[in-house]
Image (spheres, rainbow, N blue to C red):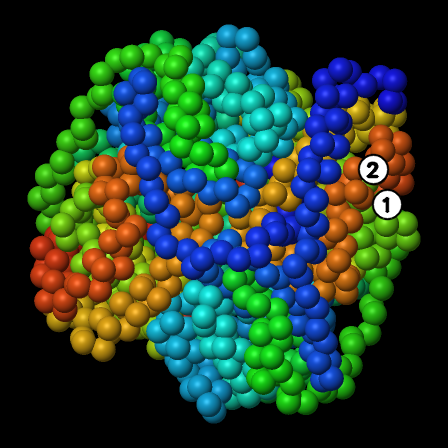
Amino acid sequence: MTPTKKIISAFSASIFIFSTQLAQATPEIQHWKNEHGSKVFFVAAPELPMIDIRITFDAGSARDHDIHGLALMTNGLLSEGTSKLDADAIAESFENVGANFSNSADRDSATVNLRSLSDKKWLEPALATFIAVLSDPSFAETVIERERQRALIALRGQKQSPQSIISNAFYKNLYADHSYAAPTLGYEKSMSTMTRRDIQTFYQRHYVASNATIAIVGDLDRKGAEALANTLTAKLGKKEKIATIETVNYTAEKKRVHIEHPSTQTHIMVGMPSHARGDDDHFALFLGNHIFGGSGFGSHITKAIREDRGLAYSAYSYFAPMRAQGPFVVGLQTSTAQTDEALQVLNDTLTAFVNNGPNDHELAAAKRDIINGFPLRIASNSSLLNYVSLIGFYDLPLDYLNEFTDKVDNITKKQVRDAFARHIKLDQLITVTVGQSADEG
Amino acid sequence: MRSKRTLLSLGLASLLAAMATQAQTKPSDNTHEYTFENGLKLIVKEDHRAPVLVSQVWYKVGSTYEHDGISGISHALEHMMFKGTEKFPDGEFDRIVSDNGGRHNAFTSQDYTGYYQEFEKSRLEISFELESDRMRGLLLPEEEFKKEIRVVMEERQLRTEDNPQALTYEQFNATAFLNSSLRIPVIGWMNDLENMNIDDLRDWYEQWYAPNNATLVVAGDVNADEVYALAKKYFSSIKPSAIKQPKPRQEIEQNGTRKIIVKAPAELPYFISGYKTPSLLTAENESDAYALAVLSAVLDGGNSSRFAKKLIRGSAIAANVSTGYSLHSRGDTLFHFDGTPAQGTTIDQLISAINIEIDLLKTELVSQKELDRIKAQVVASQVYQRDSISSQASTIGALESIGLDWRVIDKFVDKITAVSAEDIQRVAKKYFVEDTLTIAELDPQPLDTRKPKRPSTNLRH
């Protein structure tokens, strides 16, 4: 989607007059099921006259089966035409009232999003179009053809991006036969042969009320949110919720994969599938990763690679928990001649951390960072919408945010070390490099 | 044109009017400005929505202050600002901020260098203590510099050398601007980075880092007078320095289209073009700048803009196409176009299609409906921007740093609303002229071409 930008980014600011407000506690997340069986998660945020809505469908690319790219294509086509409105009319009806529509798909889920002013005069036209886009996409052949061509261009664009090449190769090697292996954007072959019927079938199966999680943050009350949530899914199909994604059965041995690319830097990713959303070890892994490579300067990997040796601009690690076991990743990019040195430092640093865990001082410091900084995580409607959607889609406890700092505070050094030992097997790590191989230099 | 308004656009116009009166808030509300004797300006925006704050220090220095041979020095110095003072040695800055749950980072642009921390609301003093200390107290150790300049070179490789579109942009920009400092890339030319030394940085730091060349912006759940008192404690005793502005190096007049080809390993063709235009600050008539901003939105302001409708959907000649115009620059700027042709079409065809759109702007007035749409987007986005204190603070800091009074934010909606179809036609005719056009085309080379590798050994010492 073309973002509304330029002028919009060039100016600014305004303030809403609120003389006093009590120190903000963790916001209350209200939860219910709407008339059509969709889960609804709502946070009232009356301070600004705006509303954010995100509907998350269990309709990510892990549902593509052999038609790779189908989930993303289906999601992208929603706003390209309904039975009554063409793409131009859809875009106009959002933008004429200053509403921002966006959509997205990743491996686990597909979303449709609306940000609008809360005044009815602005909200209602945007909402009507939003519901039409969601419930009545036409998937016209000519539009499919155009978007297919644009997808093929995007796929070609990935070939000149070492970041895209390595990410695709990393997932392919970690997930082998699992449905997370293929890229969300698909492959040229699958994109070339995908049919209108494939798209319609995917839509009809996945974009149903029982498969939707609705998150609403903004300037409305519970009653208003209930009515809104019912309206959103009224015209969706009524099939049962689809089955959950299979667990990852990871048995690979340690290996290194290299892909040749004419870049001046070699990109490196090291990792393996780790854990799913809701895993008991999540907070221990999150805290441990904060110390190891998740918090930028001062974390082990950034210090060893960047601060001590100047080997890379960006050196990082993260866990990406998903419905099934998402990956643990350590990554960096370095001038090709330094590849071996950087890999050695990365592996030594990771091995030391997995074997030894953090020390008392590091653990206490990381807790202070996360706990003292917690208010920043929930300071805006956008960040709240992200959390609420996540909690809803992954069936995390409703008190996830309330318990967040306590959970972190109660983690011990041993728990971090044990959790890393359970999830990060040094003899099963996969290393992917993209760049120019040393022997041909 | 008014008589041609459709019912729909009349409806929108009244909506806009309703919105404008309903929201009797101004962007500048609850914002307070203070100036200390040493020249430091402090601007505080109170926003009590969430118990957090952002603190930013902006220095008026960036790549447009640089000259040949030291390109990238403002950005390299930004990296070194985290490498320690006597009071807070290397690593302490990060440790203290993270102990307090803060987020921090820095940024360098053509016109300014900025540093920020975000904290829970009670921790502003930490920011002031650290920032006031490194405004003058940076140690700039040579050993740290030798490592950090390698990090900067890695950053350049990541962002530019290995990104064919960024590489094309860099050479495009240096072709459009021949003698002014606008040609200098913010990250710096590689050879200048390779030859940069610690003395260069020490001189640059001495020259530009002073209270009278800085703006302090705080936004969030704070009390303005308390912020002022705290700023006074930490910053008011810092001595000002004589800031010697660089020579103007006014860009020579361009008399003819400039066209270059950039070959690089790539898969997709790409082009970027640009016409010389003034910014809000340099425009003889400021309405020209606002009209160019609205013109940019007519072509590319969202999915209902002309480019999306006509070039991406309609004729499907473009896979991607966009415009760019930077209203807020301290010098002149470019109105630029860039894009990738759709499968089966060429760059020439895409450029021709864009030229037809440019001609249309010169010969026909844009519709009231389009203007109303842009105004609606602007009004709404002003509300949306209030969701982020950082974004609000950044707007103030950027305006001040380029030499515009931050209060212009209050005029923005009115200025945009005042732009007429005739204004757009006028600026299209005035600025979209062949003689000030520069075009760069990326000529994709096979991806199995090998680039020379950067030797690492000779950079170590």
Q: Is residue A120 left or right of residue B25?
A: left
Q: Is residue B8 left or right of residue A304?
A: right
Residue visible at 83% across and 60% down in the picture: B251
**Front-most of A27 and B176?**
A27
| C-alpha separation, residue under disc 2 versus residue under disc 1 | 7 Å
Identify the secondary structure beneath mark 1: helix
- For badge 1, the amino acid type reads Ser
Q: Quadrant of the C terminus of chain A?
A: bottom left
The crowding category of the residue bearing disc 2, from other C-alpha atoms within 10 Å (few below 14, some 14 to 19, many at least 20), is many
Residue corresponding to mark 2: B419
Residue corresponding to mark 1: B287
**Front-most of A341 and B36?**
B36
- For badge 2, the amino acid type reads Val
Q: Is residue B310 left or right of residue B437?
A: left
* Res B8 seen here: yes
Residue visible at 78% across and 75% down in the picture: B246
Q: Earlier in the sequence, mark 2 or mark 1?
A: 1
Q: Position of residue A405 (x, y in %)?
A: 27, 59
Marks 2/1 in contact by CB < 8 Å: the verdict is: yes
Q: Is residue A236 left or right of residue B376?
A: left
Residue A140 drawn above or below residue B186: above
Residue visible at 80% across and 44% down in the picture: B415
Task: Indicate the chain on which mark 2 is placed.
Answer: B
Identify the secondary structure beneath mark 2: loop
Residue B56 drawn above or below residue B326: below
Q: What is the tally of numbered marks visible in this picture?
A: 2
Q: Position of residue A116 (x, y in %)?
A: 55, 33
Residue B201 drawn above or below residue A430: below
The crowding category of the residue bearing disc 1, from other C-alpha atoms within 10 Å (few below 14, some 14 to 19, many at least 20), is some
Task: Indicate the chain on which mark 1 is placed.
Answer: B
Residue visible at 43% across and 51% down in the picture: A262
* Res B154 seen here: no
